[in-house]
Image (spheres, rainbow, N blue to C red):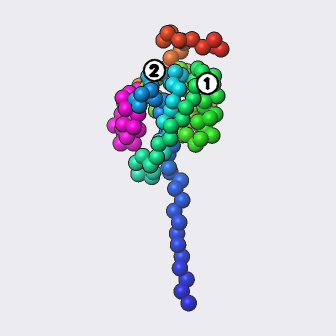
Amino acid sequence: MFVIFAWIKINTTMKKIAVPVVNGNVNGHFGHSEQFNFYTLDNNKNIESVEIFEHNKGCGCRSGLAGILNEKGITLVLAGNLGEGAKMNLNAAGIEVLTGFSGNAGEAVKQWAAGIFKTEITLCSSHEHGHSCNRH
């Protein structure tokens, strides 16, 4: 009699990253983004899949976006810049936020995965960037 044991490794370290994009590049302002790319990375931090997510519900800090990203399994947001309200909402939803990214969205994810990026902590504290959100 032969007994065969098979060990199945469950992928528990897979990471799901959201990047706000415009024309394939990291959007410089999170709250203006109507499209996000969701990148799923394998255990070796290689991009396994990309999902395009459309979101045009208005200002990022008040639109419920943090809850939506959390429900979709996002654990990290790579952004160019974002407001304090959006960052607080994302952090409260258990989502880490890194800013200072620019250029091609996929390349930004690869730079993060390789650890070759410079995080800048520049949060918008008001709507001095030529836009407004009447709900503040």
Visible residue check, residue 46? yes
Q: Position of residue 54 (x, y in %)?
A: 55, 31
Residue range (magenta): 98-117
Visible residue check, residue 97? no
- Write the residue at 37% across / 40% down: 110
Q: Is residue 136 above or below residue 110?
A: above
The residue indicated by pointer 2 is 122
Q: Using the rendered view, name the quadrant where residue 99 is placed.
A: top left
* Pair 2/1: label in front: 1
- Write the residue at 59% across / 41% down: 72
Q: Using the rendered view, name the quadrant where residue 65 is placed.
A: top right
Q: Is residue 44 above or below residue 127?
A: below
Element at badge 2? loop
Quadrant where the N terminus sits is bottom right
* Furthest residue toward left: 116
Horizontal relation, residue 16 to residue 114: left or right? right
Few, some or many C-alpha atoms within 10 Å of disc 2 (few <14, some 14-19, many ≥20)?
few
- Number of numbered callouts drawn: 2
Mark 2 to mark 1: distance in Å? Answer: 24 Å
Quadrant where the C terminus sits is top right
Let me know if residue 110 is in the magenta part: yes
- Residue 57's label in the rendered image is 1
Q: Amino acid at mark 1?
A: Lys
